[in-house]
Image (tube, grey):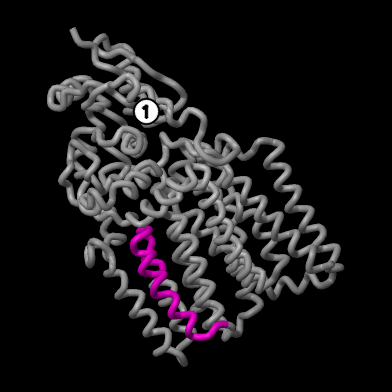
Amino acid sequence: MLRSLKILVVVLLLLFYGLFLTHKIDLTQADLGRHLKNGEILFSHPEILKTNFYSYTHPEYPIVNHHWLSGLVFHGIHKLFGFEGLSVFFILLSLATFFLFFGLAAQSDFRVASLASLIVIPLLAERTEIRPEVFTYLFSAIFFFILFQWSRGVLSRRWLLLLVPLQILWVNLHIYFFLGPLMVLVFLPGNLKRFKELGAIFLAVVLVNLLNPAGLKGAFEPFKIFEEYGYRVVENQTFWFLEQFMSNPTFLFFKLVLGVLILSFGVRAILEKRRLKNFFFHPNTLLILFLSAAALSATRNFTLFGYFALPVIAANLSRAGEWFKKFNQFGLNFGIAGLCLFAALIFTSEGYMRYWPYWDEFGIGLEKDSNAPADFFKREKIQGPIFNNYDIGSYLIYGLYPDKVFVENRPEAYPVSFFQDVYIPMQEDDEEWQKQNRVYNFNAIFFGAGDNTPWGRRFLRARLGDKNWAKVFSNDEAVIFLKKHE
């Protein structure tokens, strides 16, 4: 009966996380459109691997397409099963990732892992949009699981060999592939007696990073990508900066998880004061210190931090978890199951889900009006050149290709001067707008209705009062203007 209760707790936790994951796709605000188009035309246009192929402003600008394989995977699933299949695929990968991290946490203490999950899961919901980073989450879980179980003697060294082909996939799926070698590296100090064994794997997972279309340049891209970032991206900002301008419940849950994590280290330090040297050089400690710093520096790292925080909190409090033995184990697990169910019901019935990023409508597949703006544009046979805003660029790539875009949401794909001297000033200043209009001879403006940048809002207000432009389409997703011709 106790085992059945534990299974019920796990099912309820997966259900709770699934509620955050099960929302429809707003294609106008997502990167997904570009990834799908990458996968569709990769073999006919291999230029997308090395140039800013979709832009008419900087088509030859050199780039490293560090997520090309994700586009191929997403396109394949979309071709077979549509957007609904993509949603299900993403949900399953995310739940599998949580299951692996929870499994490691439960090995330390099931009860602590279950209770900690209730504050970790809402933090994981910071990133529930279909992106290549889902592969980083899954591969991080697999790497950590194999390394942890091998270090405990549960898995044989043959399992370590699996990390090499996984790393080859990882370097082509998402730019956070450097986490693979990092995780192997942090396990080296605690396994000095098997240094050659693990050292050989470390060398291998470092070297296979060269097996990407850009070779050495691609292997070093994670450490160079921000050198040419001319546009401030929300997800790359700190939470204390963002909370001045926006409300996001994950900020609160990040503070809660970080606070519990720090408290857990304090408890462990007290209980294991005679073994503090091993404590500080433990892989858990080294990894979570790095990921805590990453999460503090950019909100895009909240989810990765949350996944790893779960097993670390459980491991730190496992000794303190003996306190639970004072209680009836059946009653305790029954209470935990009740808490999980209560949390799921509260978040659902009170509509709290809608306050989380990307969450607007429950379900899978596309939001109802996601295709409406592009369908209108094509139906009316509107011609370019198009001036569009940053956020909607990937949507236009998916919906209007082979038409090229003015800009899309990859800052590294454009010179810094383009954003600082052209893109932002032409929205802030009408004289600069007219200057660039003469250069590019825009015929249409395709703008995301959700653009909340001060320059974007000002630009839309100016065009609404501009006698040279007529608004021909608008909904909650986008607004389209067409130049008036005499």
Determine the main secondary structure of the stretch shown in magenta: helix
Q: Residues within 10 Å of mark 1 (few under 14, many from 20)?
A: some
Q: Is residue 454 left or right of residue 433?
A: right
Residue 382: x %, y % from top left:
28, 21
Image quarter where the N terminus lies is bottom right
Residue farthest to the front?
80
Amino acid carrying mark 1 in the image: Ala
User: Can residue 468 be seen here?
Assistant: yes
Up-down relation of residue 108 to residue 331 (above or below): below
Q: Which residue appears at 63% of the width and 68% of the height?
A: 103
Q: Is residue 169 magenta?
A: yes
Would you identify the image quadrant in which residue 8 lies? bottom right
Residue 257: % across, % down:
59, 57
- For mark 1, what is the residue? 374
Q: Which residues are magenta?
A: 155-180
Closer to the camera in the image, 217 or 56: 56
**Is 174 situated above or below 366?**
below
Residue at left offset 29%, top offset 23%? 445
Quadrant for the C terminus in the image: top left
Q: What's the residue at 56%, 41% (across, down)?
A: 364
Total numbered labels placed on residues in the image: 1
Q: Secondary structure at mark 1?
A: helix
Is residue 116 in the magenta section? no
Q: Estimate the x, y position of residue 243 in percent, counting from the top left.
A: 49, 41
Asked if residue 266 can be seen in this view, the reply is no
